[in-house]
Amino acid sequence: MKLLNEYLRETFGCKVYKIALDAGFTCPNRDGTLGTGGCIFCSAGGSGEFAGSRTRSITEQIEEGKRRVGRKIRDGRYIAYFQAYTNTYGPAEHLRERYMEAIEHPDIAAVSVATRPDCLPGEVLDLLESCNRIKPVWVELGLQTVHPGSAAYIRRGYGLPVYDSAVRELRARGLEVITHVILGLPGETVSDMQETVRYVCGSGATGIKLQLLHVLRGTDLEKEYAEGKVHVLSEDEYIEILKACVPLVPENVVIHRLTGDGDKRLLLAPLWSGDKKHVWNRIRKEVLSIG
């Protein structure tokens, strides 16, 4: 298996940190195009709680991010991570301004764009391709699951063929594709989760993020949890699921994430995930040493 840190050092020859950005976008699952509530697990910040402030320019957010990690990095570089909401949802020229501001920053090694597979029209694909000629561009797709029942429950808003088409189009243009998967969705078995991981790894994606399901304040998932309809994974359960899923990821697919802790101001469950150091030590000892 290949983890992100190893891949970054091989690719850029130095330590690389992600700087999360909020470029001021919204989402078709929030603005009424598909819906108004967003995905059931998505916070009011569009999963961008760790991003900079949208009231600041992209350059200002990058500089602020650099200051936050300045003590951890020596002679390193950064990835501009367009994280909050859907970052290909807008006119191509508007997107170009935001992307190019990041690309032109001398300390930015690559750009990562989080989006939905159903928000990649031809002109945006062409834009991403042209930006990728200047600096590496990764596109992160929020798939979460391959199972139609789960997709309907989380209100994903598109079918699996849309994801397949997006991956084909992006890879045909030479872009890296990172697919987000949520482990622990209500009603899914370990076999279901393994099926999703296998599918992603065979889809053409070059990277995968395995994310623990969190219940955050202000989401519709919070209501389901309060009513006792949602089981959140224990630490031991999650470790066992990782043991079952991680060996399915081939060497040519980079593992970008193995857990997640959520914003502690919003996190309702599982609270154990907030102890990042402890959780990562268990993953390293019990999951990454297998095989």
Image: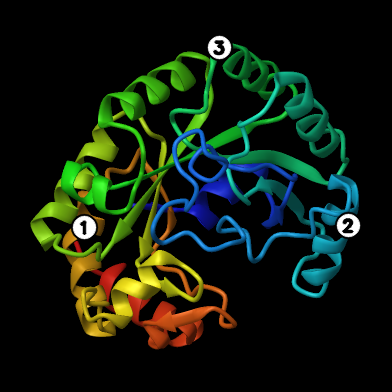
Q: Which residue is mark 1?
A: 245
> For the residues marked 1 and 2, what is the alpha-carbon distance in whole angstroms?
37 Å
Mark 3 vs 1: CB contact within 8 A: no
Q: Earlier in the sequence, mark 3 or mark 2?
A: 2
Q: Tell me the amino acid under the disc marked 3.
A: Gly
Q: Earlier in the sequence, mark 1 or mark 2?
A: 2
Q: Earlier in the sequence, mark 3 or mark 1?
A: 3
The residue mark sitting in front, 3 or 2, is 3
Per the image, label 1 sits on a secondary structure element best described as helix
Q: Residue at x 21, y 55 (%)?
A: 247
Viewer can see residue 105: yes
Image quadrant in which you'd find residue 82: top right
Residues packed near mark 2 inside 10 Å, few (<14), some (14 to 19) or many (20 plus): some
Q: Which residue is mark 2?
A: 63
Q: Residue at x 36, y 44 (%)?
A: 156
Q: Tell me the amino acid under the disc marked 2.
A: Glu
Q: Is residue 79 above or below residue 223?
A: above
Residue 39 x %, y %: 42, 52
Per the image, label 2 sits on a secondary structure element best described as helix
Q: Tell me the amino acid under the disc marked 1.
A: Cys
Q: Is residue 253 above or below residue 76?
A: above
Residues packed near mark 3 inside 10 Å, few (<14), some (14 to 19) or many (20 plus): few
User: Could you tell whether 211 is left or right of 184 in the image?
Assistant: right
Q: Which residue is mark 3?
A: 122
